[in-house]
Image: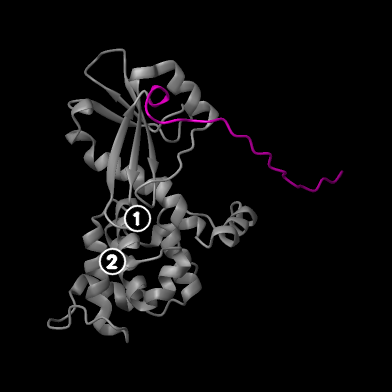
Amino acid sequence: MVLTPEHVKTRERPIVVGLYLSKYDSVGLKRLGFESFTEAFNVIGYALRSRPASIKNYRDEFDPLFPNRRKGWRKRPIRSNCLSVFEEYENLDLESFTGLIRSFVGYDENAGSEVHAVEERADGESHFAKRLITGLAAEHYFESVHASIPEFKDHVLENTTRLGCGFDFRLRLGDAGDFLAVEVKGLKERSGGLLLTPREYEVATTLKDRFFLFVVKNFQESPFHEIFRNPLDSRLQFRRTERITVHVSWLANV
């Protein structure tokens, strides 16, 4: 049977990830494109709307069951919910298990696989890890902290990531017609390059002070954020770049 994310309950997914990281250890890290367990805990934790510490604790829960260098929680029996997950998924091979973990966040290995392969050869880092950092992990981090940010206090949050409107979140205060737009970006390290699409740049130009660039940094160690209001009129210096991509297809008449 081919496992899909529908086979795994949402609340069990962090446990399954913990099992994977314990069983496959550094090999599993490499297959997912992470350089350290800390980075994996942070990125996968936020991507699954779980705490990074929870992913670590679940890995440690399974460690006594596998021959790795960590001791884990060996002074007590494994918890029943973790034991049931272990019994169901322990026999998954590396390829199937890796595919299952990736599927939890909607990653389709077949989509654009040719482009992904080129990127992975170019910088040695998995497209999966990079896409989580710049996408779901950063977006879910914002969702988890936005209510504590003064600029967004008492605003109602709407996720617009799938609407193609040039920003990730719309925030409204009461019934007011105006809204704040927030575009979220994620960085693996404490600094790095930021890319605005033509649509994002256009909206930022139009909205000005109502457009916020929310940057989540340092997923490799301990994530923190920096906010840029009206980023096109800030200390950030954006420069125009162009890239031409060639798409090859085959056509037949019938």
The residue pinned by badge 1 equals 43
Judge the density around disc 2: few (<14), some (14-19), many (≥20) Cα neighbours within 10 Å: many
Q: CA distance from mark 2 to mark 1?
A: 15 Å
Q: Percent position (x, y) of residue 254? A: 86, 44
Displayed quadrant of residue 9: bottom left
Judge the density around disc 1: few (<14), some (14-19), many (≥20) Cα neighbours within 10 Å: many
**What sort of colour scheme is used for the picture?**
one colour
Helix, strand or loop: magenta stretch: loop
Foreground pick, 83 / 194: 194
Displayed quadrant of residue 18: bottom left
Three-letter amino acid code of the residue under disc 2 = Ile
Circle 2 SS class: helix
Which region is colored magenta? 231-254
- Give the residue at x 40% y 74%: 26
Circle 1 SS class: helix
Q: Residue 15 has which mark?
A: 2
Q: Percent position (x, y) of residue 17? A: 34, 66
Measured along the vertical axis of the image, is residue 171 above or below residue 220? Answer: above
Does residue 219 appear to the left or right of 144 in the view shown? right
Does residue 128 appear to the left or right of 240 in the view shown? left
Residue 158 visible? The answer is: yes
Q: Percent position (x, y) of residue 55? A: 27, 63
